[in-house]
Amino acid sequence: METSEHKGMCRNAVWLIAILMSVWGCHSPSRSDTSAAQSHAVWVWNAEEFRGKKEVNRFTSFCEDNSVGIVFLHFAGNYANIKRVTAACTEKAIRVYALTGRPEMALKKNHSEIVLFIDKVQRYNSACRPEERMRGVHLDVEPYLLEAFSVGSRESILVDYINMLRLADNHLQEKDMLLGADIPFWFDGKSQHGETHKYGVKLDGILKTVSEHVIDLTDYICIMAYRNYVDGHDGIINISQNEVRYASRAGKRVYIGLETGSGESIPQKTTFANKGKSKLISAIKEVEKIFADEKSFAGMAIHHYKSWRELD
């Protein structure tokens, strides 16, 4: 069985090859295809809105205006719309990843869904033009939303969740695509109130926090650091720093996610919907300044396109 140390060495070597190839003007479609440069990412949950050239141009212009270099596109619906917006993004040097996820996918009995989804993306890539292809798979699987998570099955669900990621990681090694995942900030054991709770999972005899296992098994993560303030014990910086530092040691990449959506289910302190665009921009600049020297820091990830676009 391949050890995590060996996998880390292999991936680091591939990263070096990709950097050299970029210097030589070549492109490698390998799992090292994340850029060392910082840029923002954005979630897009509805590809159906890209039915025409006008909507696509509006989106790519928005991405350029807001330094977006990565798009997590919900991979569902009409392939024509997915191809249309992906090709336009590729022309602007914006990378697109196939987004999927629901809490139930974390459970062992549903792990086949991950393999089927990866194979679906691969078939899509094989059948379309290079500029229309997905660059990887982005998982938004949130196991803590399962009812059983809070009524005594937390440990077994987390074990299943980590094994789901390992399955995806192994399957994508064969498909030559990147793997990313969204995680809550408290997967490192830090609660929203500042207390420490070890959400540990033992994998191959090694006990680590859930966030550490996720970082080990993916090419990059997005921390859902959903707060609308930077400082304080539960501000964006403090709730993100453990993951950023661990990822730097592991040679992985981290996006720090911020929320812009609104609704009854979204607490006010978790979103910039009630703060506005200027406060969001200010927070982004502060976070970038703090983590600028961390080699794992890839940029910010904003949830999501529609609500971000509509911020005043």
Image: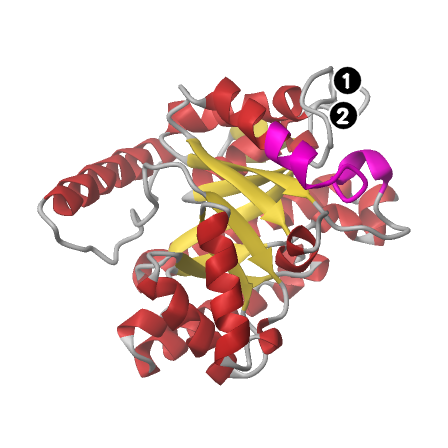
x and y, in percent, of residue 188 in the image = 63, 27
Q: Which residue is mark 1?
A: 194
* Left or right: 12 in relation to 290: left
Q: Does the residue at mark 2 contact the one at mark 1 (Cβ under 8 Å)? A: yes
Q: Which residue is mark 2?
A: 191
Front-lying residue, 168 or 132: 132
Residue farthest to the right, as pictured: 264
Residues rendered magenta in the picture: 267-282
Quarter that holds the N terminus? top left
Please say which color scheme the image uses: secondary structure
x and y, in percent, of residue 244 in the image = 50, 26
Name the amino acid, label 2: Ser
Q: Secondary structure at mark 2?
A: loop
Say whether residue 120 is visible. Answer: no
* Left or right: 23 in relation to 94: left
Residue drawn at point x = 41 percent, y = 25 percent: 248
Front-lying residue, 16 or 169: 16
Q: Secondary structure at mark 1?
A: loop
Residue drawn at point x = 13 percent, y = 53 percent: 26
* 90 over 187 or under it: above or below: below
Decide whether residue 158 is among the magenta residues.
no
* Left or right: 256 in relation to 169: right
Cα gap from disc 2 to disc 1, whole angstroms: 5 Å
Callout 2 environment at 10 Å: few (<14), some (14 to 19), or many (20+)? some
Front-lying residue, 154 or 143: 143
